[in-house]
Image: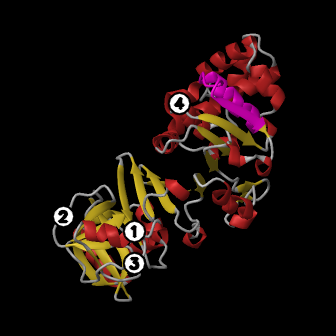
């Protein structure tokens, strides 16, 4: 996929470029050479055709994050990968607006997802990004959305922004490096972690968007740590600082919308395996709210170190997948193979926690055959490896 440049973006925003984008949308998804030939046959030059087809492809991918708005936005591949999903950005913006925020500094604005959401909630946004192409696209997206009067985009180093001038600060440090891919060490973020961590002292109403695996120890004193899941996918952690903090920890599920809050430092009740096992949403696990979840459904852990929750009776909950336990046995490949053969299981959905076994290799070793489907949970009970045969997930 060709790289997006300031020149190609400028070309796409001309009347001829808009025609090329419309034409590219008609042929997108087909064989690339044929699509390029189709655009050139309509009189578009090679450079414009390539740029338009790149955007058409990215817009197609972006629909999962941005819905219908993606059709009029501009993207880079890296920017799209890091962009906040529209539903997450909208919820954050609504919370900021409800807290009385009227002006916002958006540091590391990327393609502008959070800035757009904030502007739609009546917040005036000053957005900066250090990359010229990304900043230009954020400005183009603000204009395409009819929000250019509420969003000012500047290509600048986030550390130079006088954040004290704004009601609130939203910071989304870059967590990818050219040639290295995803960065997991906060010290390697851009802007650097020391700057990011110092923002709440300068502007108390600060929100930090971070990787879901962020260390809880980095949470500023008194801040709220929120882990957000969309449709079962854990997408981000957010640290809400100063007056914006409402609870110590929060697990937020979007689609269906639900929230679980707590201190994040409790221990769950431990007891025997029950008739039902629950695999908590990753937002619940990452926010350290498994004990709160277990208490909410009257459940327990079978091992204090393993985040599977058990009940004797079924409980409906949006915070976990529920499976009926039909058999429990100490793990033994021979015994498990015999049991599955007896049950006629040819398709096996495997989950594991606290087990070193590799599911794909285990399926081969089990030599599955038969017309039936079942679930298998590999875990530990009181430190010992066990296999739980289950029904399909609910």
Whichever of callouts 2 and 3 sits on the residue coming sooner in the sequence is 3
In the picture provided, is 2 more to the left or to the right than 225? Answer: right
Q: Tell me where residue 289 appears, x and y as whole percent.
A: 39, 68
SS at mark 4 in the image = helix
Whichever of callouts 4 and 2 sits on the residue coming sooner in the sequence is 4
Q: Tell me where residue 188 appears, x and y as whole percent.
A: 75, 63
Q: Are marks 2 and 1 in contact (CB under 8 Å)?
A: no
Q: Tell me where residue 279 appears, x and y as whole percent.
A: 35, 66
Give the CA separation, mark 3 to mark 1. 13 Å
Instruction: Residue at 64% x, 36% y: name it.
Output: 125
Give the CA separation, mark 4 to mark 1. 32 Å
Q: Which mark is residue 289?
A: 1
Q: Nearer the viewer, mark 4 or mark 3?
A: 4
Q: Magenta span covers which residues? A: 134-154
Q: Which mark is residue 236?
A: none
The residue tagged 2 is 314
* 192 or 37, nearer to the observer: 192
Whichever of callouts 4 and 3 sits on the residue coming sooner in the sequence is 4
Q: Residues within 10 Å of mark 3 (few under 14, many from 20)?
A: some
Q: Are marks 2 and 3 in contact (CB under 8 Å)?
A: no
The residue tagged 3 is 306
Q: Quadrant of the C terminus?
A: bottom left
Q: Which mark is residue 120?
A: 4
Give the CA separation, mark 4 to mark 2. 42 Å
Q: Nearer the viewer, mark 4 or mark 2?
A: 4
Give the CA separation, mark 4 to mark 3. 42 Å
Q: Residues within 10 Å of mark 4 (few under 14, many from 20)?
A: some
Q: Nearer the viewer, mark 2 or mark 1?
A: 1
In the picture provided, is 151 more to the left or to the right than 129? Answer: left
Here the colouring is secondary structure
Q: Quadrant of the N terminus?
A: top right
């Amino acid at each position: 996929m060709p790289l997006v440049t300031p020149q190609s973006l400028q070309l796409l925003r001309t009347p001829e470029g808009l025609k090329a984008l419309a034409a590219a949308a008609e042929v997108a998804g087909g064989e690339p050479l044929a699509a390029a030939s189709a655009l050139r046959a309509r009189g578009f030059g090679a450079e414009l055709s390539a740029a338009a087809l790149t955007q058409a492809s990215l817009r197609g991918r972006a629909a999962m994050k941005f819905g219908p708005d993606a059709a009029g936005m501009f993207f880079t591949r890296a920017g799209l990968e890091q962009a906040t999903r529209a539903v997450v950005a909208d919820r954050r913006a609504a919370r900021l607006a409800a807290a009385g925020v009227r002006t916002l500094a958006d540091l590391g604005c990327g393609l502008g997802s959070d800035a757009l959401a904030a502007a739609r909630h009546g917040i005036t946004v000053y957005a900066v990004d250090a990359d010229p192409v990304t900043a230009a696209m954020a400005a183009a997206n603000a204009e395409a959305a009819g929000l250019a009067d509420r969003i000012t985009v500047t290509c600048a180093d986030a550390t130079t922004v006088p954040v004290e001038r704004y009601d609130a600060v939203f910071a989304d440090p870059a967590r990818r490096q050219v040639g290295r891919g995803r960065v997991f060490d906060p010290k390697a973020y851009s802007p650097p972690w020391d700057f990011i961590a110092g923002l709440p002292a300068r502007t108390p109403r600060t929100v930090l968007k971070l990787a879901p695996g962020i260390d809880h120890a980095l949470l500023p004193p008194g801040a709220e740590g929120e882990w957000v899941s969309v449709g079962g996918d854990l997408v981000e952690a957010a640290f809400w600082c100063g007056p914006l903090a409402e609870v110590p920890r929060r697990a937020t599920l979007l689609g269906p919308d639900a929230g679980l809050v707590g201190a994040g430092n409790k221990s769950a009740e431990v007891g025997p395996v029950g008739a039902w096992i629950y695999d908590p949403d990753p937002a619940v696990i990452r926010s350290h709210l498994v004990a709160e979840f277990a208490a909410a459904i009257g459940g327990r852990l079978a091992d204090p170190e393993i985040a599977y929750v058990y009940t004797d009776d079924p409980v409906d909950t949006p915070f976990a997948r529920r499976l009926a336990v039909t058999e429990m046995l100490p793990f033994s490949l021979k015994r498990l193979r015999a049991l599955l053969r007896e049950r006629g299981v040819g398709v096996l959905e495997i989950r594991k926690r606290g087990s070193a076994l590799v599911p794909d290799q285990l399926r081969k070793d089990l030599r599955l055959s038969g017309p039936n489907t079942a679930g298998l949970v590999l875990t530990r009970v009181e430190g010992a490896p066990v296999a739980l045969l289950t029904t399909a997930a609910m």
